[in-house]
Amino acid sequence: MSVAALRHDWTRDEVAALFALPFNELLHRAHSTHRANHDPNAVQVSTLLSIKTGGCPEDCAYCPQAARYSTGVKAEKLMSVDAVVARAQAAKSAGASRFCMGAAWRSPKDRDVAQVAEIVSAVKALGLETCATLGMLSGSQAQTLKQAGLDFYNHNLDTAPEFYGEIIHTREYQDRLDTLEHVREVGLKTCCGGIVGMGETRAQRAGLLQTLATLPEHPQSVPINQLVQVEGTPLHGTEALDPFEFVRTIAVARILMPASMVRLSAGRQQMDDAVQALCFFAGANSIFYGEKLLTTGNPDVEHDRALFRRLDLHALEVVEEAGTVHADIMETEASGCGQGCGCSAAA
Ligand code: SAM
Ligand code: DTB
Ligand code: SF4
């Protein structure tokens, strides 16, 4: 699909009407859009690492890293370049093509950005795509990261503008839009999505997706997180979302932003394999891979390898100017006994 064919004028009513389609009708439309724009059997694989954990001054009601909630997350300082590179190398060996580094900051200080820039350059030198999520950024901080070789910046809108005030009180929706603008202006690719299952209404889920799809550019990567409920956070105990409603959210994201990568993001460990399969059919084509997200669990690597085999999925190869990054979570040293059972026994 040509960029000219992308729409940036979706209305709330149109998005609500997509959510309201009969489930099979919605999935048919989403899958048709998906096939017209992407290899339906390819999934982009990213590994996450928390490079600076906990102790965050913000009050995001979902987040185990906010200092004000008792969640058992221990605050740690920024990791060293060598320690991050070792983890990135392991992620690459396991088949990840992108390495995403998260820090529990409201907004980094310039000296923090300088240190992260060193980390980014070293990870990039391994031949991985790089992504960072460090909180609010100024234009010059975004520029420093771009120059260091950063490919993507993750900064989520999290939810619809009208529900935002019930989730976060320590910064505004507009602050998020401003950071996204700084990131786009220096030519970084944006990774921007949100969380569902926080007690929002369907209209508010539609509001999140409509806001994402009417940004000046569709984010190149759209993570759709299902709330991971962590004891001690205000959202712990929120009524769980119907899994089919989660699938609908993925499907609508795919229809609104046809060329973007839609990531089936946090929440996979709590999700049935069959629901994940429906998400891939509905247009999800990216995952986080590796036992941990930032502070919470993710499906183990063997489970994901087995899931890819069962669904005949393969990891997306990333073609960069510098050459092709061969990403295949099936073709790594630890790919198991070769019988397709997903076990970790040697061949
Ligand atoms: N501190 C930075 C910020 O907030 O932009 C970067 C890290 S923050 C953990 C990145 C994103 O993780 C949040 O915007 C949110 O969308 C997601 N997230 C955090 N806790 C989550 C949870 N319990 N369940 C699902 N997603 C979560
Ligand atoms: C995104 O949208 N989800 C990721 C990543 N971007 C940084 C984070 C999920 C965090 C889940 C809770 C945790 O592990 O702390
Ligand atoms: Fe801090 Fe980010 Fe967690 Fe909010 S989501 S509390 S800003 S680490």
Image (cartoon, rainbow, N blue to C red):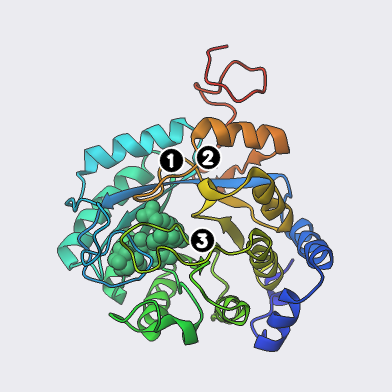
- Residue type beneath disc 3: Asn
| Gap between marks 1 and 2 measured at Cα | 7 Å
- Which of pointers 3 and 1 lies earlier in the amino acid sequence? 1
| Gap between marks 3 and 1 measured at Cα | 27 Å
Identified at 53% across, 26% down, the residue is 332
Q: Which residue is mark 3?
A: 225
Side (left or right) of 57 relative to 63: left
Q: Which residue is mark 2?
A: 325
Q: Which mark is residue 180?
A: none
To which quarter of the image does residue 254 belong?
A: bottom right
Q: Which residue is mark 1?
A: 127
**Front-lying residue, 164 or 10:** 164
Identified at 24% across, 38% down, the residue is 83
Side (left or right) of 78 relative to 240: left
Q: Which marked residue is nearer to the observer: mark 2 or mark 3?
A: 3
Identified at 54% across, 80% down, the residue is 215
**Front-lying residue, 144 or 277:** 277
